[in-house]
Image: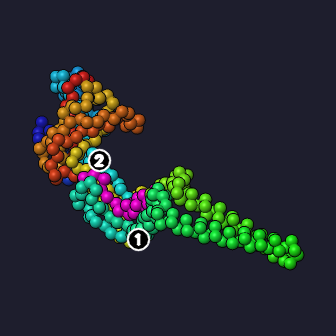
Amino acid sequence: MDTKEKLSKIRLEPHEKTTANSGFQLTRRTLLALGVAAVLIVAIVFLLVVSGRDEEVAATSPTTAGTDSTADGSTTSSTGSSRTLAAGGYVEARRTALVWPGRDGIVARLHVIRGQQVEEGDLLLELDSRTAVAAVAMASAELDQVRARLRRLREGARVEELAAAGSELEEAAAQYADAKAELERLLSLGESELVPAADVEAARYRAAAAAARVETLRSNEQLLQVGTHPAEIAAGEADVARKEAALEQAEVNLDLTKLRAPFDGRVIAIELEPGEVVSLFDVGSGIEIADESELWVRVDVPEDRLEGLELGDSAEVFAQAIGPAPLSARVVEIAPKADRQSNTVEVAVAIIDPPPILRPDMSARVNITTSGGSE
């Protein structure tokens, strides 16, 4: 068979034909093989992911030493019989107070600025006190007056008062004697009808009035000689007590115009300005003071992590403000009730010897080491 016949017997099937410009074309069998390979790769990746998750769960299982994570971000690691609870929180001062004026008024002067350190009793601000000062002066004058009267009642009559009362009584007695003699003369003349009856009646009236005045003056003299009646002294003492109370109230009102620090601390907020009108019930307008001598961090611990946690347990506090070095702390408070929404219990740790750079509301991480219990 010659070459021409051999070439004529060679022919290509339709599915094996290629175009001149296609370069390279995959067959159906090749495509099927690639698809099967892709499915196998996906299956292998899926199995690897599931296997990794199972290993992670096994590593964090309470039956093995490791770290447990909770929904709120807190973790628990256990080593032997002790556990470490880790949670985030914020630094806060153990004691804070918002103080404001206890009366209506106008702010006259501020004596502090934000960030200033103050001591207990330091003056923070003053209200306009002119009205209060006048009220104290008036109450003091009234008290002096009633005290002087009571002192006079207790001392009794002086010698000069007794002498004056005696002289007045003698003069009244003489006037009575004259009036009585005049009446007797007119009565004797009236029997002879030489004196009108009206003159006799007038003389009788003058004599009676003079006699009554003598009796009154004699009673006054006896009272002066005996002394003040106990009821008058009691009434005077009651007056003094009322005026003392009024003065004390006026002084309290005056003191309320001056706002003072309730304890040693730092001024962290001032919500008042000179010239501002304040009222007794305006609680939001005041000066906030924080006692930074003891700083706490409060964290939320899940209910199922509380076993073995006790007051006094040691802890470490990590704050970004001071770098990676931990601060020693101890558990000082475990809330007596849980939070229904988060199923957690608030726990507070007190930082031992906090550095001056630490401030309230700084973020912090807390690791609490418990000595008992197991997960």
**Which residue shows up at 31% across the image and 28% down it?**
304
Residue 186: within the magenta? no
**Which residue shows up at 38% across the image and 72% down it?**
275
Front residue of this view, candidates 129 and 75:
129
86 to the left or right of 165: left
- The kind of residue tagged 1 is Arg
Residue 193 visible in the current orientation: yes
Q: Which residue does the numbered mark 1 point to in the structure image?
A: 130
Q: Position of residue 346 (x, y in %)?
A: 32, 37
Residue 31 visible in the current orientation: no
Q: Where is residue 196 in the image (x, y as percent from the top left)?
A: 85, 77
Q: Which residue does the numbered mark 2 point to in the structure image?
A: 95
Q: Position of residue 46 (x, y in %)?
A: 25, 32
289 to the left or right of 186: left
Q: In this view, does 106 lie above or below 353?
A: below
Tell me the mark number nearer the camera, choosing from 2 and 1: 1
Q: Residue 107: which numbered mark, if any? A: none
User: In terms of image quadrants, where is residue 98?
Assistant: bottom left
Category of crowding for the residue at label 2, using alpha-carbon neighbours closer than 10 angstroms: few (below 14), some (14–19), many (at least 20): some
Looking at the rendering, the stretch of residues picked out in magenta corresponds to: 245-264
